[in-house]
Image (spheres, rainbow, N blue to C red):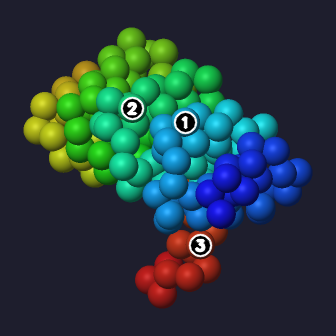
Amino acid sequence: AAPVLQTQLASDPSVMVRTASLRGLQTMKAGDMSALMQTALADKDPVVRRAALALLPGLPITPAAKATHLSTILKAGSVAEQQGALEVMGTLKSVESRRLLASALDALDAGTLAPVLHIDLVDAVQADGAPGLQRRLEAYQRKQQADALIKAFRAGAITGGDARKGQQVLMQNPLA
């Protein structure tokens, strides 16, 4: 089944088929997962690319290969893909993913990180939990002269986020 799924992932006209093929290949642990990720991350449809991002943490590839995929997305992906890449980075907790997070913090300090990604970066750093990254967030907060972290990221709080997730919280969370 693996060759059929690989062909479908690469060329089927249906987004659903390509996404299901990727998930099937991941479940089967069939083929070179790094090459399959490159195929999925290069797909023309953002749904397939986002599905590939979601699978990345569980793939049997090296942390360096995962970081390479994430770095590519951070440089050239859509906003939703960049947000997804930051989310994944926070879960990896590897030396390579922490380097990418530190790089994103550098961009934040330099004012070159898009405000739409600020909250995602904060979430990723907090999910990772590395003390050095946490200290950098605190330093940024002090630099912004904000008494709360969210005030330091006001621009990101206004422009960033994921409307779909926000709607789910509003509609499905009993506390909301």
Which of 120 and 71 lies nearest the eye of the viewer?
71
State the separation of the CA atoms marked 1 and 2: 10 Å
Q: Residue furthest right?
A: 13
Which of 51 and 38 lies nearest the eye of the viewer?
38
For label 1, the residue is 35
Q: Judge the density around disc 1: few (<14), some (14-19), many (≥20) Cα neighbours within 10 Å.
A: few
Q: Judge the density around disc 3: few (<14), some (14-19), many (≥20) Cα neighbours within 10 Å.
A: few
Q: Which mark is residue 170?
A: none
For label 2, the residue is 65
- Which residue is at 32% across, 37% downward? 62
- Pinpoint residue 53: horizontal percent, then vertical percent: 53, 47
State the count of labels: 3
Labelled pair 1, 3 in contact (Cβ < 8 Å) = no
Q: Judge the density around disc 2: few (<14), some (14-19), many (≥20) Cα neighbours within 10 Å.
A: some
Left or right, 29 with reference to 7: left
Q: Residue furthest bottom?
A: 174
User: In the image, which is nearer the foreground, mark 1 or mark 2?
Assistant: 1
Query: Residue 19 lies in what quarter of the image?
Result: bottom right
* Amino acid identity at mark 3: Gln
* Amino acid identity at mark 1: Ala
Q: Which mark is residue 168?
A: 3
- Pinpoint residue 118: horizontal percent, then vertical percent: 45, 35
Q: Quadrant of the N terminus?
A: bottom right
